[in-house]
Amino acid sequence: MRGKLIIFSAPSGSGKSTIINWLMEHKELNMAFSISCTSRQPRGSEKDGVEYFFIEPDEFKKRIQKNEFLEYEEVYKDRFYGTLKQQVEKQLGKGENVVFDVDVKGGCNIKKIYGNKALSVFIQPPSIDELRHRLEGRATDTPEVIEDRLAKAAYELTFAPKFDKVIVNDNLDKAKQESFDIIKEFINE
């Protein structure tokens, strides 16, 4: 049985990673992360082929030219992140339901390619004010970084209508359960 694709996008601080990590614990969903490529060097204990496939910037650019990516982005000069079509197809062929944690543009691109074989889910904060409160509560960013994230979040929120499902995370347990129910229904179609 061929797997399906589950795409998650959200502004920073919306709870997306928390929800995805909780869903990954549910073995009956048979979810596996898409392993992306990056042109940056491994950090800490990261291993090639586990967290990312680490490739040189020139190799990344060659693969872009060959149209090997479902989606990619140059975050900084020569700092690329992207998802290889071949890797996703390999995981789908093994029957895994492949999970993407991507930005809104990447999510829309993947959905466009796979159509109804992909479910796109947008995790939305209850409000920009609540998002500010969460980002400040993390105490990991400077006020300038928080302002940048909030400006980006306002832009990302305009993409929510392009997603199959929008889950407002005003209650984490409720958002987790809603995500679970939506995904279970999708993979059992």
Image (cartoon, helix red, strand yellow):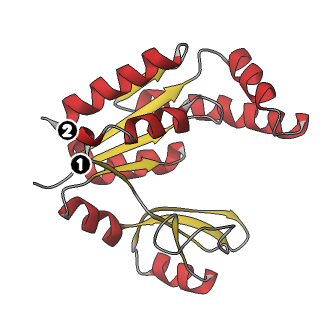
For the point 89% across and 39% down, which residue is it? 142
Residue carrying label 1: 4
Q: Residues within 10 Å of mark 2 (few under 14, many from 20)?
A: some
Q: Position of residue 49 (x, y in %)?
A: 46, 72
Question: Considering depth in this image, is 48 or 106 the residue closer to the camera?
Answer: 48
Q: Give residue 95's position: percent from left, percent from top.
A: 18, 56
| Structural crowding at the residue carrying mark 1, measured as other residues with C-alpha within 10 Å and reported as few (<14), some (14–19) or many (≥20) | many
| SS at badge 1 | loop
Considering the image in quadrants, where does the C terminus appear? top left
Of residues 33 and 87, the one drawn nearer to the viewer in this rendering: 33
Three-letter amino acid code at disc 2?
Answer: Ile
Q: Which residue: 50% across, 28% down?
A: 123
Could you tell me which secondary element the residue under label 2 belongs to? helix
User: Which residue position holds label 2?
Assistant: 187
- Which residue occupies 44% across, 15% down? 174
In this rendering, is residue 178 above or below 53? above
Percent x, y for residue 156? 59, 35
Is 102 above or below relative to 18?
Answer: below
Q: Are marks 2 and 1 in contact (CB under 8 Å)?
A: yes
- Mark 2 to mark 1 CA distance (whole Å): 7 Å
Amino acid found under the numbered disc labelled 1: Lys
Mark 2 or mark 1: whose residue is earlier in sequence: 1
Q: Quadrant of residue 27?
A: top left
Q: Is residue 64 above or below residue 177?
A: below
